[in-house]
Image (cartoon, rainbow, N blue to C red):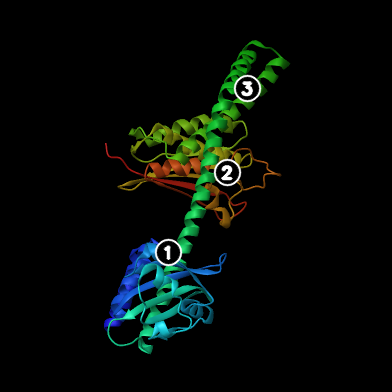
């Protein structure tokens, strides 16, 4: 029962400690207690050098041991490693495979030894040893116990390798994310100045030119305005991406904000004969928000226009409960496949393949919307019965009491 308690203690320790070296040190301390021996050590196999190297030890000089490689041939540890079986040797000096260099260099004399292999996924990676039984000799029961500890040790090592791989993968992702963020920041900054010049000249020509030249100037102006909108998306996304967005909160009447956006878009939509409807709430509703929250609803309404065929229907509805406000933008457009309902909020995600796209944009609008809603402690999601059946985007925000 005492051994079982200590094995459980090892398991608990493995769950609470993530760093490998402290884990192994703690395991060896438990081994010394359980086996009632002087010292314990763990050796790992170096495939390049084809040697065993001391990694951690308790009851002996770790620094000195670390500098002593153990040959696989001509050592007891090597036999345990190659034969993949526990060994009990209660008279070590008389054993022909005793590697005396360790004793000669450290002065630590080994009288008795119990060693077991450490195996991960059918591959032997090292040896766990207990040295110098204090009273009596090492027994088969000791060997069984140490084998269980070796199995726990292999779990700790395997988990450490997994964590290391995950950390490396996360670092690579972080570096990739930083490159993307840096590119977006530099690109949006460098393009802003020449775009300002183009917009200035296009505006001047549009006002001053006549006839065909005025139409050409209008085309240039419209293209420049579209590019400016893309740059604004890049800038907003980068601020959200890097966590540099700082909100300036103030009470905002939500229906006024959305009605203003709705009216602006309605003027454009009437030319294509869309059927637009705005259903306001039955009472004034307020949110504590940054002005940039309006970008969320601009993106949702613009998307509804882009992805709804002419003569289609678009409905904006605002309702509330005691603590939350729900804004719905419903359209009769192209709809969303069930597999894409969540993916459409990813950065740069496009429903269409980039080589045969009919709809413009960088695929940042919904990502920006989600990022901004998250900053306001809200939630945004999409619902659709499938392709061709329209879609509804819903934004849930905390209600602010005035």
Circle number at residue 135: none
199 relative to 246 in the view: left or right: right
User: Closer to the N terminus: mark 2 or mark 1?
Assistant: 1
Q: Position of residue 120 (x, y in %)?
A: 50, 73
Q: Secondary structure at mark 3?
A: helix
Residue 206 sits above or below residue 335 on the image: above
Residue that label 2 marks: 348
Residue count near mark 3 (Cα–Cα under 10 Å), binned few <14, some 14–19, many ≥20:
many
Label 2, label 3: how many angstroms apart (C-alpha)?
25 Å
**Residue that sits furthest to the right in the current view:** 212
Mark whose residue sits in front, 3 or 1? 1
Whether pointer 2 and pointer 1 mark residues with C-beta atoms closer than 8 Å, the reply is no
Mark whose residue sits in front, 2 or 1? 1
Residue count near mark 1 (Cα–Cα under 10 Å), binned few <14, some 14–19, many ≥20:
some
- Foreground residue among 150 and 286: 150
The quarter in which the C terminus is drawn is: top left
The quarter in which the N terminus is drawn is: bottom left
Whether pointer 2 and pointer 3 mark residues with C-beta atoms closer than 8 Å, the reply is no
Label 3, label 1: how many angstroms apart (C-alpha)?
72 Å
- Foreground residue among 9 and 235: 9
Q: Secondary structure at mark 1?
A: helix
Residue that label 1 marks: 66
Q: Position of residue 276 (x, y in %)?
A: 53, 38
Whether pointer 3 and pointer 1 mark residues with C-beta atoms closer than 8 Å, the reply is no
Circle number at residue 221: 3
Whether residue 223 can be seen here: yes
Residue count near mark 2 (Cα–Cα under 10 Å), binned few <14, some 14–19, many ≥20:
some
Label 2, label 1: how many angstroms apart (C-alpha)?
51 Å
């Amino acid at each position: 029962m005492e051994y079982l308690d200590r094995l459980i203690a090892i398991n608990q320790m493995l769950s609470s400690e993530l760093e490998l070296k402290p884990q192994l040190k703690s395991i060896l301390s438990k081994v010394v207690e359980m086996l009632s021996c002087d010292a314990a050590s763990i050796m790992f196999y170096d495939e390049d050098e084809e040697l065993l190297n001391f990694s951690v030890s308790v009851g002996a000089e770790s620094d000195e041991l670390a500098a002593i490689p153990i040959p696989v041939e001509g050592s007891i540890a090597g036999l345990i490693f190659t034969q993949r079986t526990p060994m009990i040797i209660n008279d070590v000096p008389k054993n022909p495979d005793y590697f005396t260099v360790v004793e000669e260099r450290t002065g630590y004399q080994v009288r008795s030894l119990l060693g077991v292999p450490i195996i991960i996924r059918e591959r032997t990676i090292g040896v766990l040893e207990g040295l110098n039984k204090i009273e009596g000799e090492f027994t088969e029961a000791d060997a069984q116990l140490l084998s269980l500890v070796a199995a726990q040790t292999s779990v700790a090592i395997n988990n450490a390798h997994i964590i290391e791989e995950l950390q490396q993968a996360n670092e690579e992702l972080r570096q990739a994310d930083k490159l993307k963020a840096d590119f977006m920041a530099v690109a949006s900054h460098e393009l802003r100045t020449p775009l300002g010049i183009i917009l200035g000249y296009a505006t001047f020509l549009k006002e001053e030119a006549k006839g065909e030249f005025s139409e050409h100037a209008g085309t240039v102006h419209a293209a420049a305005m579209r590019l400016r909108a893309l740059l604004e998306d890049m800038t907003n996304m980068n601020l959200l991406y890097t966590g540099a967005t700082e909100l300036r909160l103030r009470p905002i009447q939500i229906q006024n904000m959305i009605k203003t956006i709705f009216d602006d878009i309605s003027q454009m939509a009437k030319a294509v004969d869309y059927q637009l409807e705005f259903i306001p709430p039955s009472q004034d509703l307020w949110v504590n928000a940054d002005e940039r929250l309006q970008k969320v609803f601009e993106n949702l309404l613009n998307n509804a226009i882009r992805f709804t065929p002419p003569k289609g229907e678009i409905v904006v509805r605002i309702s509330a409960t005691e603590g939350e406000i729900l804004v719905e933008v419903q359209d009769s457009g192209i709809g969303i496949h069930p597999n894409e309902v969540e993916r459409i909020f990813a950065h740069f995600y496009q429903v269409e393949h980039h080589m045969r796209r009919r709809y413009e944009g960088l695929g940042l609008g919904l990502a920006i919307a989600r990022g901004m809603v998250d900053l306001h402690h809200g939630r945004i999601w999409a619902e659709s019965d499938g392709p061709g059946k329209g879609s509804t985007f819903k934004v849930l925000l905390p209600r602010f009491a005035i």
